[in-house]
Image (cartoon, grey):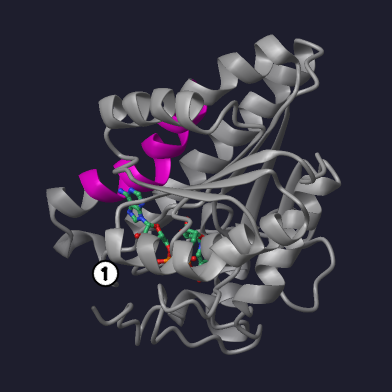
Amino acid sequence: MKLKDRIVLITGGASGIGRIMGEIALKKGASALVIWDINQENIDATIGELKAFGKVAGYRVDVSNYDTVAESYAQVKSEVGDVDILINCAGIITSNKTFDLCSAEEMDRTIKVNTLAPMYVARQVLPDMIARNSGHICNIASAGGMLPNPKMSIYSASKWAAVGWSDSVRIELKEMKSQVRVTTICPYFITTGMFDGVKSKVFPLLKPQEVAERIIRAIEGNKKMLMLMKWIPQPHHFIRLLQVLPMNVFDWLMSDVLGIYHAMDNFTGRKK
Ligand SMILES: NC(=O)c1ccc[n+]([C@@H]2O[C@H](COP(=O)([O-])OP(=O)(O)OC[C@H]3O[C@@H](n4cnc5c(N)ncnc54)[C@H](O)[C@@H]3O)[C@@H](O)[C@H]2O)c1
């Protein structure tokens, strides 16, 4: 779906790739950008920066709370209008601990923000889109949602679930013969700060601007699934192909050859 004259809602839109996608949306002529984020300071700063490019509305919303999401969606409908494009981008990583050391709080919070929140928001927006037979939902998952990855097992689980849910909804809509589209995005590590400290032996870390631009192009081109990794044109086909290998060979490739299984060893995450 093209962005011109559309109302675009971006969760996690006050930082990282969400913020950049908001800027691109306005520059492409979106009629309004709606930012939902938990960080009020970043919302204010983002509105300050982006208002020169078009209409921006920011709401402090904890997307992991279903009731808050429902109330905020009603508010957006009455104050801004019907959402044409939803980009579920809010996400968290809590640590690089091995699973035996992770707390229940980390498990709950990660699954709530990365897995349940995109469902909560889509559950509000989708019935209206289906009724209008128009709309686009883009879910930002992760390459960690297609590959196992040590020291981020809960994050990986949350994104695998997000990929399975997102692509299933796409198929439901297709079977309904609806014009509403779903795009699932699985980027490799990006230098936004969220994964500070991560080292990648072979594949370069991705730049936020290029990732944001490719996601917007994927929405405009109604792409179903986009995995983003430098040098490999269709990484999700490549990964699926590699998964026919015996598991020990696959693990050796990911660990010793590509170093992906050790990327989290020096993770620090964004400093507050
Ligand atoms: N950075 C990477 O290497 C990378 C790689 C693959 C996928 N991703 C995914 O891309 C998305 C964006 O990541 P980013 O790198 O731009 O990160 P970021 O930390 O810069 O942005 C995430 C945003 O989500 C917001 N957020 C967190 N919890 C929230 C909540 N409960 N309610 C509302 N907003 C909340 C944060 O305040 C922040 O503004 C995430 O879903 C992330 O998992 C990131």
In the rendered image, residue 131, in percent from the top left (x then y), is placed at: 67, 10
Secondary element type, mark 1:
loop
- Work out whether residue 160 or residue 88 is closer to the camera in this orientation and state it: 88
Can residue 186 be seen by looking at this rendering? Answer: yes
Residue depicted at x 78% and y 52%: 218
Q: Is residue 220 left or right of residue 148?
A: right
In the rendered image, residue 58, in percent from the top left (x then y), is placed at: 42, 49
Can residue 187 be seen by looking at this rendering? Answer: no
In the rendered image, residue 3, in percent from the top left (x then y), is placed at: 76, 46
Q: Is residue 38 above or below residue 201?
A: above
Residue position for label 1 = 95
Highlighted magenta segment, given as a residue range: 108-123
Q: Is residue 118 left or right of residue 245?
A: left
- Of the four image quadrants, the one with ligand 1 is bottom left
Mark 1 CB in 8 Å range of ligand 1?
no
Residue depicted at x 62% and y 56%: 186
Q: Is residue 47 above or below residue 113?
A: below
What residue type is disc 1 on? Ser
- Work out whether residue 150 or residue 193 is closer to the camera in this orientation and state it: 193
Quadrant, the N terminus = top right
Residue 50, magenta (yes or no): no
Residue depicted at x 52% and y 78%: 255
